[in-house]
Amino acid sequence: MPKVFVSYSHEEPEHDSWVLEFSASLRKNGVDSALDQWDLRPGQDTTLFMESQIRDSDFVVLVCTPMYAQKSNIPRGGVGYEKNIISAEMLQSQDLRPKFIPVLRKGEFQTALPTYLGSKYGIDFRTSRDQAEALDELLRAIHEVPPSSKPSIGPNPFPKPEPAPGAILAPVFTNPTAGVIRVDGHVESWEKRALGRFEFLRQTRIDKKKDDPFEKGYWQASFALQGELRDVGLSELLDILRKSKTGRTGWDIGWVPTRDEIAPYPFQNGIEVWLAETGGKGPGHSDFWRAEGIGTFSLFRGYQEDETDFAKQFPQIQLDISLVLWRVAEFLLYIENFSRNLAVGNPNANLRIQWTGLENRQLGYHKAFAPSLQKHVCHQPSVESHLHIPDTTAIKKTLLRYLWTITRPLFEAFNFFSVTEEQVEQLIKGLFDAKKETGI
């Protein structure tokens, strides 16, 4: 029996009565519908009630009106809080089946549906439409029954020829006996999944009474290997992650902590670490990372420049050139280590980095830089950059070129600022000495 939570805004008594009757009609038709008028008990925490109902339901039906849209677009109150939970879950969901179903009770679709619902198809329940017909459409969606008018599929008039004996059409393993898999390196879809998970954890784990370390902005770096990998379970993947540390700084990429409160944990075929805990920690030390055995990894980290000590010492700098270069260089070196520990041969990798919360930030260098950077301010909220790495086992040899290439769009967003490869080499010398490590 499908479980459905009905989300709506309290308006005039007639509207609340309609919602009550609407929810009752769902129950009469084999749907376990939940409603605050029935299920929210006196003294119960309303936010926990909303979270659990949205999380545990198979579907969430949103009764849309202009007032519902208005309340949803304000980040407070019951409907506004539901919007935060729903939008986060929509981002992290990997299921193509629609969980959130808008129904239009009053107004027009353009003004009654909250902005976060985007272009989702809704069902018209306005008084001008036959209510039984509308209810039938909704019930078919919930029970996953196609419309009665939909014809069955006939035979293909152009049958494909049978494959040749021994032909392999779509292998999962390139060498099953050796435990090797082939991956396509599709970083865009991986980046979106990781972002959805990150936003969900921000909404559900950070205490609203504490500072959100990511509120002012963060950077996300994601990569996906492309080629042949060893087929490993989560325990072996965790060991690979431990071995992949670069050891270049005191706050390593993909750090695997041992303290129970922040230790890595398995989640949906992957491993995660959430270092922000319940909030109130320094942005530069509030990592979230997630890795999967299919050669994918994502890191989210706030800016060290937003931490109190840095801001007091360098109030004119909101993004430091050398810190950016060190972070990205360390991430590139991590890709090489991760690939060497997991891959078979010399795989490719696709890398994407996004910096958020950039608008009105001032670019600078805490050890002084010429010419003056006083006019290098960013006028856009975020910057994205991407890079294809043809051989992940040889990143050190071309590190300076990769580093210059992938950070160039970020620096240019600060009033056309740029650095040369020679300047990059000097700025990261404390992290990576190109001449000593590559012999070039």
Image (cartoon, rainbow, N blue to C red):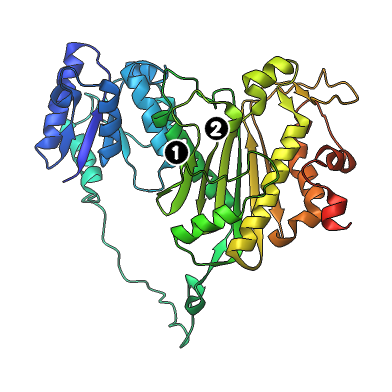
| Residue found 46% across the figure and 88% down from its top | 165
Residue 269 at x, y = what percent? 42, 54
In the image, 412 versus 73, the foreground residue is 412
Q: Is residue 300 above or below residue 366?
A: below
Q: Nearer the viewer, mark 1 or mark 2?
A: 2
In the rendered structure, the answer to whether residue 318 lies left or right of residue 221 reads right
Is residue 68 positioned above or below 422 on the image? Answer: above
Q: Is residue 293 visible?
A: no
Q: Amino acid at mark 1?
A: Leu
**Secondary structure under badge 1?**
helix
Q: Quadrant of the C terminus?
A: bottom right
Of pointers 1 and 2, the one earlier in the residue sequence = 1
Which secondary structure lies at badge 2? Answer: loop
Q: Position of residue 182 (x, y in %)?
A: 55, 67
In this figure, which residue is indicated by the disc labeled 2?
Answer: 286
At x 39% / y 25%, what residue is drawn?
Answer: 114
Neighbor class of circle 2 (other Cα within 10 Å; few <14, some 14-19, many 20+) is many
Residue 27 point in image, percent of width and height: 12, 36
- Can you tell which quarter of the image residue 405 is in? top right
CA–CA distance in space, label 1 to label 2: 21 Å
- Which residue is found at the position 17% from the left and 14% from the top? 14
Q: Residue lying furthest left in this view?
A: 28
For residue 120, what is the image quadrant? top left
What residue sits right under mark 1 in the picture?
91
